[in-house]
Image (tube, grey):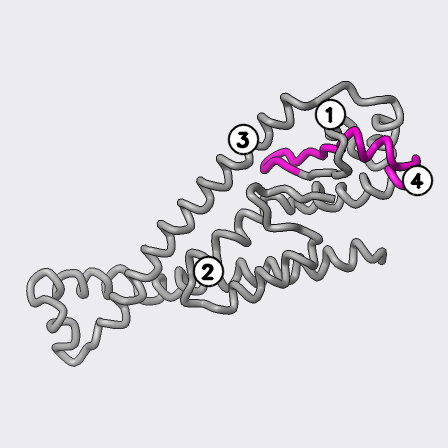
Amino acid sequence: MTPSASRLDSANRSFFALAAAALVPYALLGVLGCGVLSLAGYRLATQGWGGLDRGGEDLRPAVVLFGLVTAGTVVAVISVRRQVRATRALEARLRRSTVPSPSDVAAAAERARLTGRVAMVDDPDLFSLTYGLLAPRVVVSRGLVAALGPDELDAVLHHERYHVSNWDTLKVIVARAAPAAFFFLPALAHLRDRFWPAASLQPIAGPWRRW
């Protein structure tokens, strides 16, 4: 197993643990069931907060959990929406900067099994990006292509292919949204912090990474 593949496996373990932990609040609501929440809503409407612990049943924890999950879901939706907008803005900016790729870039993309997914942007800085949600693509800068030899360019594109095939750009959105939404589960922030370095990702403005 290559070092990149090993880091990717570690990143996947952290990500899937994060996703599973994020489902815990929803699972708890499923266990509570609509009946308990309906009863709690009825008591709140008719008797106020003090009525939640009458009749031998204390429904206050259920109401608190429901409130936290509802608020967290709203936060998650806002986070995802903001990140999708950032992704679209990034894509538009990259399209405006795209220039025809030289033959060596096309050849390297084919060797990396990224045919049709690699573009070059007119930028003197040295970087490569993996971006996009449902159809991830790779961008390399003119400066990077000029600075690298064929073997080094192959290494860069093979590295980016891991992110493309692993859907890391989509996972970044989840890894950002879940800890913010479920702030009452500190483990999510810890798993997110493990996911970033393991996947060699940088938490920048949009779901993409800089080489």
> Comparing marks 4 and 2, which lies closer to the viewer?
4
Q: Are marks 4 and 3 in contact (CB under 8 Å)?
A: no
Q: What is the magenta range?
A: 131-153
Where is residue 184 drawn, in percent x and y?
41, 67
Q: Position of residue 67 (x, y in %)?
A: 28, 60
Relative to 66, say whether 97 is above or below: above
Q: Position of residue 60 (x, y in %)?
A: 22, 72
Classify mark 3: helix, strand or loop: helix
Which quadrant holds residue 138?
top right
Mark 4–mark 2 Cα distance, whole angstroms, equals: 43 Å
10 Å neighbourhood of mark 4: few (<14), some, or many (≥20)?
few
For image coordinates 63% across by 21% down, the residue present is 96
Would you name the residue on which mark 2 appears? 23
68 vs 40, nearest the viewer: 68
Q: Which residue is mark 4?
A: 151
Task: Looking at the image, tell me whether mark 1 or mark 2 is earlier in sequence order.
Answer: 2
Q: Are marks 3 and 2 in contact (CB under 8 Å)?
A: no
The residue that disc 1 covers is: 122
User: Of marks 4 and 2, which one's residue comes earlier in the chain?
Assistant: 2
Residue 146 is covered by the magenta coloring? yes
**Residue 31 located left or right of residue 84:** left
Q: Position of residue 75 (x, y in %)?
A: 38, 51
- The residues bearing labels 1 and 2 have C-alpha atoms spaced at a distance of 43 Å
Q: Amino acid at mark 3?
A: Ala
Of label 4 and label 3, which has the lower sequence position? 3
Disc on res. 187: none
How crowded pointer 1 is (Cα within 10 Å; few <14, some 14-19, many 20+) is rated as: some
* Residue that appears at 58% across and 49% down: 172
